[in-house]
């Protein structure tokens, strides 16, 4: 399922990037795009993705009559917009129709900005994704991705992990933090998989949440990305962004999940989750959102909560949007950024 969805995502990305390069690029950018077409240099791709996706979104915002985001409306010669952008006003109380329309529009914009959105944990099968997701608590996906190759090389199956020496597992997963509790969780779930599910990861929410250390969020990640079962993943980024967009003011992940499930068709759930999490990690950060470089700014009622100066905001961008390596050591083929370095690379 993972490979199939990665391929699906690849097609719009190429189209959109090419379209942007031919319609919006400066001569210098065009030269970069032409060079990419023949050389496909990873670093050039990163720079192009960081520049072109917001530009395309700014164009679509213009065509729909919304204001230009401060950070994406820079002309090639560099003048800044005369009128500062203001946060989108939402009539109170907002009608259900208006909320649904607004939320779906944000999703469409995010799809333009992140056509390559994907789960940021490296995995090759449902068991690996399940273990990696449990290990990702209280740490970054990058650190998990740098840790799991050695773990899965030593214990490739639930049976192997269930029979492992806990101290050896603790040593292997130490870089992810809370390694004693996490060892108990992943060995406990490996034993449950071995003893109750014939060594296979079950493909049902009700069975997954009964496994040790597996909550609803982990279960939805596994279902959505290893089984193709649509699911909303409400993590810290997802919750923060939907509150900033005033889809809800709830802090309760289950209430947020129910509300978002009600706004979007099932077929959107998994990719919507990836897009929102991508946006939270790259642009709409918890402490310093990069509002001045945010393609969603014209639709955002919280614009101005973060840095609005386009140049300063651009410096806050992370991963491929900031020209930096991503979180996955083995990203999908359509990812425009660079792979993350292995653990021993520093
Ligand atoms: S970065 Fe700013 S403008 Fe963009 S979504 Fe977040 S709060 Fe809104």
Image: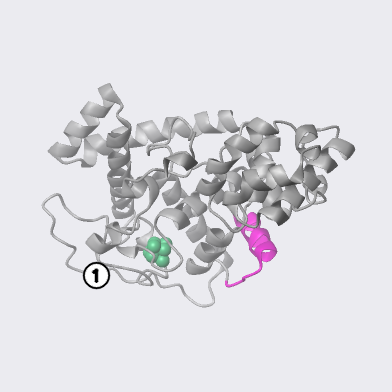
Residue annotated with mark 1: 84
* Side (left or right) of 331 relative to 164: left
| Range shown magenta | 249-265
Colour approach in the figure? one colour
Q: Is residue 206 left or right of residue 66?
A: right
Relative image position of residue 183 (x, y in whole percent):
72, 49
In the image, is residue 17 above or below residue 137? above
* Residue drawn at the location 57% of the way across and 42% of the way down: 147
322 to the left or right of 269: left
Percent coordinates x, y for residue 16 in the rendering = 35, 36
Measured along the vertical axis of the image, is residue 112 above or below residue 215?
Answer: above
Residue 256 lies in the magenta-colored region: yes
Placement of 77 over or under 89, stated as above or below: above
Q: Which quarter of the image is occupied by the C terminus?
A: top left
Residue 29 part of the magenta segment: no
The residue drawn where x is 51% and y is 53% is 277
Q: Which residue, as the protein is rendered here, is positioned at the far bottom?
A: 92
Residue 133 visible at all: no
Q: Which quadrant does ligand 1 occupy?
A: bottom left
Whether residue 259 sits left or right of residue 325 in the image: it is right
Q: Give the structural element (helix, strand or loop) at label 1.
A: loop
The mark total stands at: 1
- Between residues 261 and 51, which one lies in front from this camera angle? 51
């Amino acid at each position: 399922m993972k490979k199939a969805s990665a391929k699906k995502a690849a097609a719009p990305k190429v189209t959109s990037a090419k379209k942007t390069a031919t319609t919006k690029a400066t001569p210098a950018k065009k030269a970069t795009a032409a060079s990419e077409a023949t050389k496909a240099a990873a670093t050039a791709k990163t720079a192009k993705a960081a520049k072109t996706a917001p530009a395309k979104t700014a164009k679509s915002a213009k065509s729909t009559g919304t204001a230009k985001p401060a950070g994406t409306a820079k002309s090639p010669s560099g003048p800044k917009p005369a009128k500062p952008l203001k946060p989108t006003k939402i009539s109170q109380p907002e009608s259900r129709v208006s909320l649904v329309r607004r939320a779906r529009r944000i999703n469409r914009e995010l799809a333009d900005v992140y056509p390559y959105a994907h789960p940021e944990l490296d995995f090759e099968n449902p068991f690996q994704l399940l273990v990696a997701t449990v290990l990702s608590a209280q740490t970054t996906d990058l650190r998990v991705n740098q840790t799991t190759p050695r773990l899965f090389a030593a214990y490739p199956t639930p049976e192997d992990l269930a029979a492992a020496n806990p101290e050896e597992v603790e040593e292997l997963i130490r870089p992810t933090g809370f390694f004693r509790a996490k060892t108990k969780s992943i060995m406990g779930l490996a034993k449950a998989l071995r003893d109750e599910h014939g060594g296979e990861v079950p493909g049902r929410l009700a069975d997954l949440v009964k496994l040790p250390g597996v909550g609803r969020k982990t279960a939805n990640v596994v279902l959505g990305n290893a089984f193709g079962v649509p699911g909303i993943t409400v993590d810290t980024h997802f919750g923060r962004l939907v509150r900033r967009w005033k889809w809800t003011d709830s802090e309760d992940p289950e209430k947020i999940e129910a509300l978002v499930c009600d706004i979007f068709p099932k077929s959107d759930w998994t990719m919507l989750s990836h897009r929102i999490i991508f946006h939270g990690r790259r642009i709409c950060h918890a402490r310093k959102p990069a509002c001045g470089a945010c393609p969603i700014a014209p639709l955002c009622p919280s614009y101005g909560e973060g840095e609005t100066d386009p140049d300063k905001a651009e410096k806050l961008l992370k991963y491929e949007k900031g020209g930096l390596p991503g979180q996955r050591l083995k990203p999908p083929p359509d990812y425009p950024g660079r792979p993350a370095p292995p653990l021993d690379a520093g």
